[in-house]
Image (cartoon, rainbow, N blue to C red):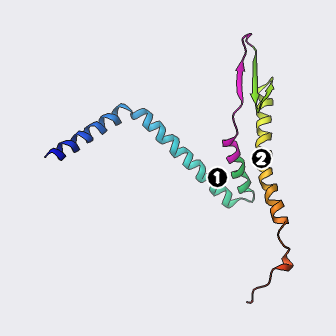
Amino acid sequence: MDTGLNFLLVIAIGLLVVLIFKGPLLRLWRNVAGEFEREQELQQKANTTRHGHFYLTIEKYDRETPEVEDVISADGSRSYHFAGNEFSSLEAAEFARYTAILAKARGYYSDIDVWTQSLPGPSHFKRRPR
């Protein structure tokens, strides 16, 4: 009988926690589900378009690259910081961030190009008998 009461107590506490934290739990669920759906869309795009993998690489580096920081100084002037550089406009800072993301993505593929160039040419591969 003691385990039955413990079980009911755990259920009651669980329901109470769900009722109290319903809003934050629902927001968390929507965020997780939204990220999953975006990832699925990107995977589908990668499988159906010619440059799909490049878009996935850009998305990866976009998540890893820090955002532009909006800094308001004591005199009230506003500046934008990215990668240790200061910009006077948000557009210039976002452009620098975008350029950095593209450079990282292109660098990923240039590493692949260097690797594939070190492979032996097609004449070194033997044909399989049919």
Looking at the image, is 38 positioned above or below residue 116? above
Residue 74: x %, y % from top left: 72, 11
User: Dot 1 lies on which element?
Assistant: helix
Residue 28: x %, y % from top left: 48, 38
- Considering every residue shown, the one lying at the far bottom of the view is 130
Mark closer to the chain start, 1 or 2: 1
User: Dot 2 lies on which element?
Assistant: helix
Report the magenta residues as a range: 59-76
| 125 lies left or right of 32 | right
Q: Quadrant of residue 17?
A: top left
Looking at the image, is 61 positioned above or below residue 124? above
Residue 126: x %, y % from top left: 80, 83
Instruction: Name the residue: 68% across, 57% down.
Output: 46
Say which residue label 1 marks. 42
Which of discs 1 and 2 lies nearer the camera? The answer is 2
Q: How many badges with numbers are in the image?
A: 2
Q: Quadrant of residue 6?
A: top left
Residue 120 lies in the magenta stretch: no
Q: Quadrant of residue 114?
A: bottom right
Residue 104's disc number: 2
Residue 98: x %, y % from top left: 77, 39
Amino acid under label 1? Leu
Instruction: Name the residue: 80% across, 35% down.
Output: 96
Amino acid under label 2? Lys
Q: CA distance from mark 1 to mark 2?
A: 19 Å
Instruction: Name the residue: 30% across, 34% down.
Output: 16
- Considering every residue shown, the one lying at the far left of the view is 1
In which quadrant will I find the C terminus?
Answer: bottom right
Residue 66 lies in the magenta stretch: yes
